[in-house]
Amino acid sequence: MSEGPTRDTDHHMEYFRFMIAQLNETIRYSDGKHTLGLTLIVSFLIASNEFVFSKIDRNIDEVRFILDLNVASALLAVAFGYLGIFPKFISPLSASAKPQGVPNIFYFQDIHKSGVDGLRKALAQAFPNSSLSPTFQDNAIAEVYALSQIVVRKFLLFKLFLYALFFFLVSLAWLFLSTVFTLYPARI
């Protein structure tokens, strides 16, 4: 018996173990970032309600608009953070999307874009002499592909979360500065 197929099979098995572990770790990391962001948003919203919102002049149209923008962006950030934590809300972006090329088998975005068949072809090229059972390969390919789909969706939701967080913090800073400058002449 030659040593080539055994070594190729071992590397093939190690690839699946490595990718599944890395993708699960990335999902846990993403969940931690979403949770931290949600805590930050809720804390800032409660603090701003106590210290900023009560001191602003709501008779000015611009201030009311910025206040509405601030609260809406906070709620939007909370919604994106919440959706980013729970995988049950995560589904493929489009069922009709065409797979694109042969992926780099170590990049989840490439795996996501290539589809299951593209991943299968890339693995057949990477491990041509592997003797893993077809059932094990199919299950492992399905798991790697599903986890890469989840990671891509979580990263997209985190990016949207960061945009909403940016609008929240900018509008909060504007409200805070307008409050400080409005109250400053009254102290003199």
Image (tube, helix red, strand yellow):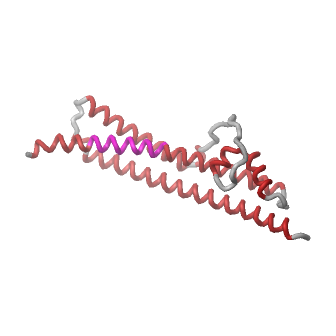
Position of the C terminus by quadrant: top left
Q: Residue at x 36, y 39 (%)?
A: 71
Q: Residue at x 55, y 48 (%)?
A: 155
Q: Position of residue 184 (x, y in %)?
A: 14, 44
- Residue 95 vs 30, above or below: the answer is above
User: Hey, which residue is sitting farthest right in the picture?
Assistant: 1
Based on the displayed image, in which of its 4 quarters is residue 18 positioned? bottom right
Q: Is residue 174 magenta?
A: yes
- Residue 19 vs 153, above or below: the answer is below
Q: Is residue 125 left or right of residue 143?
A: right
Q: Position of residue 40 (x, y in %)?
A: 39, 52
Front residue (pair 53, 18): 18
Based on the displayed image, in which of its 4 quarters is residue 128 positioned? bottom right
Q: How would you classify the magenta stretch by its main secondary structure?
A: helix
Front residue (pair 169, 32): 169
Q: Position of residue 63 (x, y in %)?
A: 27, 34
- Residue 57 vs 156, above or below: the answer is above
Front residue (pair 107, 24): 107
User: Hey, which residue is sitting farthest top in the picture?
Assistant: 61
Q: Is residue 177 left or right of residue 4?
A: left
Q: Position of residue 2 (x, y in %)?
A: 89, 70
- Magenta-colored span: 160-175
**How many numbered discs, if any?**
0
Q: Is residue 78 left or right of residue 25?
A: left
Q: Residue at x 21, y 42 (%)?
A: 179
Q: Residue at x 11, y 42 (%)?
A: 186
Position of the N terminus by quadrant: bottom right
Q: Is residue 35 magenta?
A: no
